[in-house]
Image (cartoon, grey):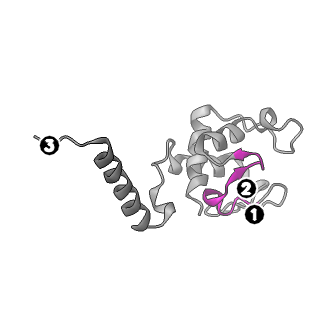
Amino acid sequence: MLPRLTPVTAWAAVCALVVTLASSGRAEDYHLPPIGSPAHGEALIAEKGCGGCHMIPGILGADGLVGPPLTMMGRRVFVAGLLRNTQQNLAAWVLDPQRIVPGVAMPSTNLTPAEALDVAAYLETIR
């Protein structure tokens, strides 16, 4: 049977765990696993021609200059300059950028929500 912890002892244990985790590695080592499939997202990006507008590392021929380069997407803080860069927000942007920023140059991608999550999962790997 485990010993019963007082609130003070439990709090001290939590603090010790946080300090241990924080000092044991870099912050980017603690990402959650992707929701979508990065491999399928990579294939979709190539198939849908995203590289006609964007430079996208890892995608052959993705050297477009219309949209912003998607280098280091996994490290960026914001998507479209206003959404926190989470996989869900990135998928929402990829799915329907006009809903997020009406009039933006990026057209609708005609992806399904699952496909948008796959694309976001791939973009998250670009660090």
Contact between labelled residues 1 and 2, with CB atoms less than 8 Å apart: yes
Majority secondary structure in the magenta region: loop
The amino acid type found where label 1 is placed reads Asp
Q: Find the magenta span and give its range.
A: 69-83
In the image, is residue 44 above or below residue 125? above
Q: Nearer the viewer, mark 2 or mark 3?
A: 3
Residue 74 is labelled as none
- Where is residue 27 drawn, in percent x and y? 50, 62
Badge 2 or badge 1: first in the primary sequence: 2
| Quadrant in the picture for residue 6 | top left
Q: CA distance from mark 3 to mark 1?
A: 59 Å
Residue located beneath label 3 in the image: 2
The amino acid type found where label 2 is placed reads Gly
Q: Nearer the viewer, residue 29 or 2?
A: 2
Q: Quadrant of the C terminus?
A: bottom right
Residue 107, magenta (yes or no) = no
| Quadrant in the picture for residue 101 | top right
SS at mark 3 in the image = loop
Residue 63 is labelled as 1
Disc 2 residue crowd, few under 14, some 14–19, many 20+, Cα 10 Å: many
Q: CA distance from mark 2 to mark 1?
A: 6 Å
Residue in the picture at 55% in, 57% down: 125
